[in-house]
Amino acid sequence: MAAKIPNRTIEEALDMQTGEIIEANSFFRLPESDLVRYRRIQQEAINGLGEPRFVCAFCKQILKISGTNHKRGAITHFAHLRDSEYCPIKTGSNYSREEIELRKYLGVKESERHIDLKQQIFNALKGSETKLGTEKIQQESRISSVSHWRRPDVYAEVSGIKIAFEIQLSNTFLSVVVARDAFYRANGIYIIWIFNFSKNTQYIDLESLMCKDIYYANKRNAFILDQEAQRMSIQNQELILLCIWWETTSIVDQNDSPDKLFRKYIRLSDLCYDPTNFKLFYKDCSVPLVNDEDKFMGNLPTESTPIQQFDRFEAILAGPVDRPHLVSVLEEQKRERIQNIMNQLANGTATLSPLEIDGKWGYGFEGEIVIEPIYTKVDFFKENGFAKVRLGEKYGFVNFKGEEIVPCIYDQTFEIYNGNLIARMGVIWSCRFIEQDLEEEIPYKWIKRLQQDLPLLLVSTSQKIFTESSSQSSTIEKSRLYGLMDFEGRYLLAPQFAYINRFINGVSEVEREGITMVANYNDGKVKIAYK
């Protein structure tokens, strides 16, 4: 009988060392010895003894490698930590496939491997400043148009020609590739996608559909920064890439059998420029898919792809138009798009995603900025329609309209629950009633969330007392007695207990005056019973 495939919540993880998107089905087929080794690495990172190898491809939080209750000793799946922050994968979400792919793409860009390759390209271009007239070399610089922006891995101008260098380490985000191609083309910037195949070609290979999507659109040229290209770039102090291209002796058939593969290490000065598609190539090996292109292209609807939309925009800008009027029209179109997004958010068919621009965070949807990036840090939107944000060292909450329903004035906050918020300003805790815009001070001096799966707060009236003499300073902490409060500010247990353990299946162990008892949580209430 074939082994049953586990029903996994987390289907993909991000390898922070290689930048690879790991598919769980393939990963958990590795030899048990490898899985045990990776499991230990993850646990050491969880314990603060090192950096994690794998994180969630969506929220970037550390993952643990776990077994199953159904098969003792089997290692079967990735899991978030019990006390991890919110992640849409854990609760389900309305994120589109394109948004999910974009988040994975941004995650890959944060990997050690990606950062190292980006630095190597930057260094190689800096080395050729005099030789090739390369200038304005920048990493992650923002490029803006009227209503869109992008941040290429490396940007440079070679003899006055603008070039964006994008490193490709994943094989799952064609929609992101198409959108970037279209943006650069509309803004007169050439783009060169650079692959990186290491000695073990497990990351991506030229037979993958994603690679074909890129090199077929680039006159069947693929550029690779492999180990030899890296060595040659350092030695020659200029960027050298391995170019692979396919020459075909006849029209491509379904089996693609007439192709012959060629390879050569090339310099930027060896490349040709395609001013129509704004791509760089070494050999033009374009092959039409059919003799009569109208069989396919004639029936396409107007502006059916991002590239067609950008082509129209580019044509407008290139023509003799009234620039102020054009900007006015484009701004009106943007307002209409934002209103359409707001309607989708209001009826629950869309969800905003965090976005970062120049070190500041806001929210967007399908490439459109909805809430301006002004915050130091932002969280995902919860099902109640609110998101926690940080401005400097102060916390607040926003709704999907960008309104600060709770201003960023608090030093610590817990999530909004049934319209109420527990927050601390200085040493004063209070319960803020969102809809009434009222605050009620809470008499406790110390509050902490007990566990992530229940809306319970651990509270105490004790506080640290600082004493100072001429010879020394010391801190004395009174014996704490703990109680429980819910997220609406209601007291469930008075602070009379020496300890309160986490609830498991609604049951916790507590101690009062040396006597161990059982606490039962049900329907928002806690009842105490003697053992």
Image (spheres, helix red, strand yellow):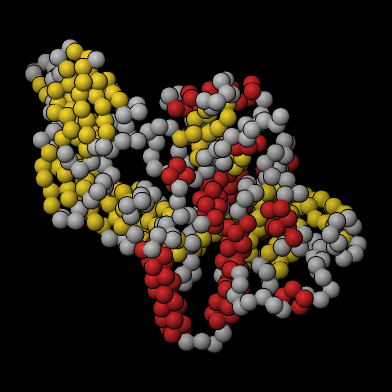
Q: Residue lying farthest left?
A: 469
User: Residue 147: horizontal and vertical position, in percent?
Assistant: 46, 70
Relative depth, front residue between 333 and 198: 333
Q: Quadrant of residue 230?
A: top right
* Quadrant position of the C terminus in the picture: top left
Identified at 31% across, 61% down, the residue is 402
Q: Is residue 65 left or right of residue 218?
A: left
Q: Is residue 150 left or right of residue 228?
A: left
Q: Give the total of numbered labels.
A: 0
| Point 42% across, 70% down: residue | 340
Q: Residue at x 70, y 58 (%)?
A: 213
Q: Is residue 394 visible?
A: no
- Where in the figure is residue 283, as x and y percent of width and height? 80, 61
Q: Can residue 285 be spotted in the picture? A: yes
**In the displayed image of the protein, which residue is found farthest to the top?**
514
Depth check, front residue: 4 or 105: 4
Q: Is residue 274 above or below residue 531?
A: below
**In the picture provided, is 339 more to the left or to the right than 217?**
left
Q: Quadrant of the N terminus?
A: top right
Image coords of residue 338 (percent x, y):
40, 69
Q: Is residue 62 above or below residue 409?
A: above
**Residue lying at 10% horizontally and 21% vertically, measured from the top left:** 468
Q: Quadrant of residue 272?
A: bottom right
